[in-house]
Amino acid sequence: MTMKQLPISYAYDAKHVQSLKKKYLQFAAMAIPLVVIPLFFVLTAPVEQQESRTAVPLSVPNPLEVSPEVENTSSSVDQRREVGLQRIYEPRCNFSVGKWVRHEGEGYYTNSTCSLIPDQLNCFKFGRTDSDFLKWRWRPDGCELPLFDARQFLELVRGKKLAFIGDSLGRNQMHSLQCLLSGVDFPQDNTKDAYFPRWYFPIHDFTMATFWAPALVKVLDSESDIKGRTLTNTMTVELDQPEPSWASEIEDFDYAIVTAGHWLFRHLAYNENGQLKGCSEEDSCEEGRNITALGRFYGIRRAFRTAFETLIRSKNYRGMTFLATYSPQHFENGEWNTGGTCRRTGPFIEGEASLMKYEMQTYSTQVEEFRMAQEAAREKGLKFRLLDTTKMMLMRPDGHPNFNGRSLHRNMSLADCVHWCLPGPIDAWNELLQYYLIEASVDNDAI
Ligand SMILES: *[C@@H]1O[C@H](CO)[C@@H](O)[C@H](O)[C@H]1NC(C)=O
Ligand SMILES: *[C@@H]1O[C@H](CO)[C@@H](O)[C@H](O)[C@H]1NC(C)=O
Ligand SMILES: *[C@@H]1O[C@H](CO)[C@@H](O)[C@H](O)[C@H]1NC(C)=O
Ligand SMILES: *[C@@H]1O[C@H](CO)[C@@H](O)[C@H](O)[C@H]1NC(C)=O
Ligand SMILES: *[C@@H]1O[C@H](CO)[C@@H](O)[C@H](O)[C@H]1NC(C)=O
């Protein structure tokens, strides 16, 4: 597929897409940069931390909560296994396919029970008035995704360390997890660099860290490039070398969640073996540098391969690895920089939305690399699991901050239709994560 075939409208309405298609095809070469820039623009700046640090206990009625023993933090894993987890664990559930169904009842947290929501994602603090979008749960076909249970989750990760590696959507998931857990064990902020937030949950000796590595691999350019202050420069990436910040520390971690994609749509120059190998597209190659346009998916594939290989080959890494797949954005009635917004208040219904071609190709490239890595990891006894969030999130145009988020570094006249409100549908990513932690605890042989 060439870039020229890419549909570039953000709108999912079929008629709208048809009418836009013709208009946009002539600009097809620009398609991906347009899609990509909001990520640098809106999302890369470190979020401002909240001042209040008071813990407010959550009271989440949980129909799946199984027994008082689960609540007893000193009970053994074996005990929990017998009493609780098995009952809600359905082996080998496929979460990729399903639908959002109505779910009445209280949410896990609110903007008042969780004091850790960054302003960028705190939609209710900044004027969002509709809350119906919180009343949906992901229902996989043929099985049930267990509700999130903070006490259970914290037992599963007691004494462990979890790393988010990648871009701001990983950070978004981290903030969701913080809120889900903070009512039971309020984390200490051990952050030294705003791009590398680190939190410690003292009661459970659990550490959560985020490693900013938007391309996963090493970026050779300046800080301002990797922190997204410059939007249009060609960034040079070492496709065969992981970003050292995470690669040097990952052996200390028990879990790694990889989230990336959007930054690899930028204008990139690709290095391999320390040599310039090619560029993402013609206009990423500087004039006079006689090198090949290898296409963006070449870079995406290599970057994921390098990240996964690094994890598999790290001598002392015995962790469980997750890939959170491509998270679609939902600008409608315009692009990110031409007045596009996301004002919907409910999910799409089946058939109403489909992935655009470049999104589908991003997703399938990620998943292909993941599957290959999973095979290799299996031979070393390492678990790889897919947080297959793409289809799920495609259906949630209602979950973004739109104009109801604040960020120091953001142009407030532009809508954020990329990140996810907290609370919001991204909380389901942590329900998936919890499922796989349960799986690992009850079925250690499932590799
Ligand atoms: C919690 O578990 C410990 C050890 O199994 C036990 O001694 C204690 O009585 C339990 N507490 C409650 C409230 O069940
Ligand atoms: C889950 O279902 C999807 C769609 O049918 C399929 O492509 C995928 O391979 C399945 N995943 C697993 C792990 O079976
Ligand atoms: C929470 O949201 C409400 C509006 O729903 C707002 O009035 C309030 O100020 C917010 N509180 C915090 C702490 O963000
Ligand atoms: C570019 O490289 C190709 C193959 O390496 C070569 O055939 C061609 O002459 C070069 N063009 C220029 C302008 O240097
Ligand atoms: C913010 O975005 C608007 C609309 O695209 C634009 O006109 C304005 O120049 C931007 N402001 C800054 C500071 O970038």
Image: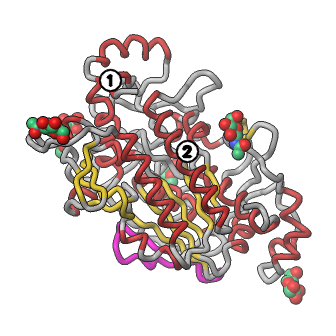
Residue type beneath disc 2: Glu
Relative horizontal placement of residue 43, taking residue 181 as reference (left or right): left
SS at circle 1: helix
- What residue is at 52 percent from the left and 67 percent from the top? 311
Residue type beneath disc 1: Lys
Q: Nearer the viewer, residue 429 or 293?
A: 293
Q: Which mark is residue 4?
A: 1
Q: Quadrant of the C terminus?
A: bottom right
Q: Is residue 421 above or below residue 175?
A: above
Q: How is the image coloured?
A: secondary structure
Q: Which residue is mark 2?
A: 368
Which region of the structure is painted magenta? 186-204
Instruction: Name the quadrant containing residue 6.
Output: top left
Residue 356 lies, in percent from the top left, at 47, 28
SS at circle 2: helix
10 Å neighbourhood of mark 2: few (<14), some, or many (≥20)?
A: some
Q: Nearer the viewer, residue 312 or 185?
A: 312
Q: Earlier in the sequence, mark 1 or mark 2?
A: 1
Instruction: Name the quadrant containing residue 281.
Output: top left
